[in-house]
Amino acid sequence: MVGDIPTEMRREHLLSFIKAKDFVKVSDLSTLFKVSEVTIRADLDVLAGHGHIRRIRGGAMPSARTSFERPFEESLSTHVTEKTLIARAAVNLVTSGETIILDVGTTTTAIAQELLRRADLQDVVVFTNALNIALLLERAIPRISVVVIGGTLRPLQHSLVDPLGGIMLERINAHLVFLGCNGIDPSNGITNLNLPEADIKRRMLRSARRRIVVADGSKVGEVALAHLCPVNDIDLLITDSSANAAVVNVLREHNLEVMMANQVAS
């Protein structure tokens, strides 16, 4: 491995390597990743701070709490009804002539499918870093224009990330962004499992006027590895009735608007 990869990507590789071992030494990680032991210790402290590894004298070991990123195709079969309801509620917020950003993920893919069904929508522009979403929306051209954000391909989610993944986002001002996540918690904010996509998600949030997180109820109250932003940095959460009611109430106390998709979707 080279030593000049982005910090977020290095930490993702670190986490994957540690998951596969019983114990790893700081010195061995320094040699493997071609960075200083000081840098490795800082990386391990960040990972340990999120509960994903345990720091042991001289190294680290996997934490029992470590979560694993599932392939896109595997996630497609979970919470299907909830994601469909969330997608319908999300697309009801889109009007003709708007520019939207669609993040990667199965819930945002459901949004793309609902966009296809909305034949009344015209002159909508969709920016996405998800190759599967771009291909899905291709059949809606020209009433929906599709712009693929460039970058390096992550096959696990069919997503494009840095380097170069965020350059286009710095040059646009979209009406809406629909952002997926692996966790939304009142104290820990919006979080995601993999680090390279987390950076792109932050740039998406900065590139849209209205910032909407779409997350089925299983993700409400959860905390994942990479912090994206606090809850007061987003405008709306669209979830479903399976979400923990107590957590939803606390999110609302933080002045976050929460839409329960099953109550509004037709």
Image (cartoon, grey):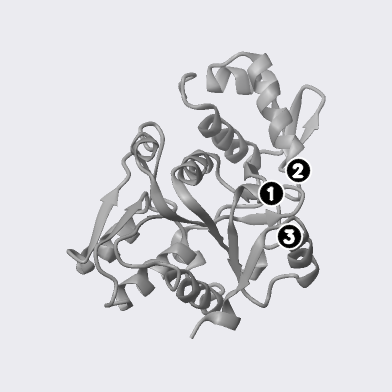
Amino acid at the residue labelled 1? Gly
Q: Amino acid at mark 2?
A: Gly
Residue 250 left/right relative to 101 = right
Q: Which residue is mark 2?
A: 51
Q: Residue tagged by mark 1?
A: 189
Which tag is nearer the camera, tag 1 or tag 3?
A: 3
Where's residue 49, x and y in %?
76, 36
The amino acid beneath tag 3 is: Leu
Judge whether 24 appears above or below 192 on screen: above
Numbered badge on residue 136? none
In the depicted structure, whether residue 147 falls above or below residue 9:
below
Residue 218 in which image quadrant: bottom right
Q: Residue visible at 37% across and 37% down?
A: 165
The image position of residue 117, as x and y in percent, is 32, 78
Between 176 and 26, the one nearer to me in the picture: 176
On screen, residue 43 above or below 114: above
Q: Which tag, 2 or 3, sits closer to the chain's start?
A: 2
The label nearer to you, 2 versus 1, is 1
Question: Looking at this view, is 106 or 246 the one in front?
Answer: 246
Q: Position of residue 151 (x, y in %)?
A: 34, 38
